[in-house]
Amino acid sequence: MSKIKNLIVGCGLSGIVLAERIASELNEEVLIIDKRDHIGGNCYDYKGQDDIIIHKYGPHAFHTKYKEVWDYLSKFTSWHYFTLKSQIVIDNEKVTLPFNINTIYEVFPEYLATKISKKLINTYGYNKKIPILELKNSKDKDLKFLAEYVYKKIFEQYTVKQWGVTPEEIDKSVTSRVPVLVSKDNGYFQDKYQAIPLQGYTKMMNCILDNPLIKVQLNTDFKDIRDNVKYDKLFYSGAIDEFFNYEFGALPYRSLYFDIQEKNVEYYQNTAITNYPNNYDFTRISEYKYFLDQKTSKTTIAIEYPQEFEDGKNERYYPIANDSNLELYEKYLQKSKNLSNVYFFGRLGDYKYYNMDETIKRALDLFKKVKENNVTTN
Ligand SMILES: Cc1cc2nc3c(=O)[nH]c(=O)nc-3n(C[C@H](O)[C@H](O)[C@H](O)COP(=O)(O)OP(=O)(O)OC[C@H]3O[C@@H](n4cnc5c(N)ncnc54)[C@H](O)[C@@H]3O)c2cc1C
């Protein structure tokens, strides 16, 4: 194999965006490989029954506050404007999630709901997000009651199911994703830009890759070619511990299993996602036709089961952020700094949960760094 100028490992959103930047801006050739048989990493989608677009690795709703990211993607796709709506089952009733002022009125008698809502607004202000662990420290007895309610009915069991540990054992960056929202806005996210690529994520990512300088090679594991391949620069969005042969030990991940089922009904549930914090082994059910508002007589759902990650058996999904795992990651990070022509990035390379917009921002920022280095070394 001749020497490759830029080798990118991982044809997920991270690798795809970086490949496009290098090819378009630096006018250099890029080979991007992936061990899977499709592009797109965990954002991959495909057409199922009735052409409903299925997100193979779980439901994906794009949302961002970064104009730079929105403008970048908008060069490659048109959009279906979409605000994710979701429900959660508490005591066998479906109520609004995010847990907001509407939810408070759904679960408590009116007099109590009014009292709690007023206190929330007066204490924190309207439109504020309060992480549940912070609310638990409130001195006010009604707010403390609310915190205990949310903690017991949603948070505790959900965390144990999703992560296999109690909320206290997990990093705050994870737990702050489940806040109480002082608002009547039922949208799950509050970002300025929220939409789904009009023809799906895979189509958008194919457009990003559409450059004669980019060559895509699927079904290719870096492990199998690393001894024979030569490159000027390697951009690695696979797992950093695997790259270093697990020298310091394996970085723990949480995995998921999606049971995708076709249903012979027009709609299965009221919202795109229903969450099940208690009972059952699964955490949520997604109904895909909602994401692009597809009008079909049948529907397709995915039932989501959290699992332990086992190498070779299932996929790495969520890095488990806690002190000891982040310490372990730090060792790999330090080691990676000795390699002058290898860059780690993406959710597996950085061992970090990134939403899609953060993934793209990380790739755009990495590209800026690479471009600066090119200018100074050329
Ligand atoms: C269940 C779930 C739901 C999500 N929902 C949302 C959402 O609603 N909104 C949102 O913004 N974000 C969401 N995300 C986050 C989103 O999936 C990530 O931001 C994005 O996939 C990260 O892209 P990536 O390229 O860094 O990683 P990945 O998509 O994982 O891509 C990495 C690629 O590298 C390949 N690879 C790894 N090792 C090797 C190797 N040795 N050789 C060759 N190839 C290799 C893998 O096969 C994979 O294709 C969700 C994530 C999950 C898990």
Image (cartoon, rainbow, N blue to C red):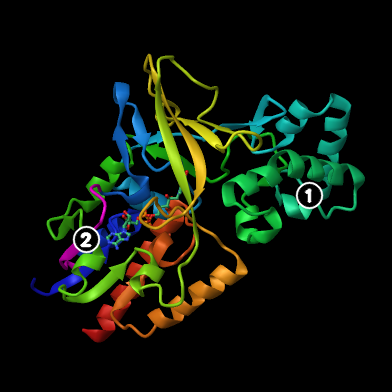
- Please report the residue visible at 36 percent of the width from the left and 17 percent of the height from the top: 296
Which residue corresponds to mark 2?
32
Q: Indicate the quadrant where residue 369 lies.
A: bottom left
Q: Indicate the quadrant where residue 335 lies.
A: bottom left
Exactly how many numbered labels are in the figure?
2
Tell me where the magenta segment starts and ends, as one range.
26-38
| Nearer to us in this view, 82 or 60 | 60
Q: Amino acid at mark 1?
A: Tyr
Quadrant of the rendering where the C terminus is positioned? bottom left
Which residue corresponds to mark 1?
124
Task: In the rendered view, tell whether residue 192 sits above or below residue 228.
Answer: above
Question: Could you tell me which secondary element the residue under label 2 belongs to?
Answer: strand
> Residue 219: in sight, yes or no?
yes
Residue 76: percent from the left, percent from the top? 28, 46
Task: In the rendered view, tell whether residue 23 sits above or below residue 148.
Answer: below
- Please report the residue visible at 37 percent of the width from the left and 85 percent of the height from the top: 338
Q: Amino acid at mark 2?
A: Ile
> Residue 127: in sight, yes or no?
no
Q: CA distance from mark 2 to mark 1?
A: 48 Å
Task: In the rendered view, tell whether residue 53 sits above or below residue 19.
Answer: above
Residue 359: percent from the left, percent from the top? 41, 57
Task: In the rendered view, tell whether residue 180 sits above or below residue 169.
Answer: above
166 relative to 246 in the view: left or right: right
Q: Main secondary structure of the magenta part?
A: loop
Q: Nearer the viewer, mark 2 or mark 1?
A: 2
Quadrant of the rendering where the N terminus is positioned? bottom left
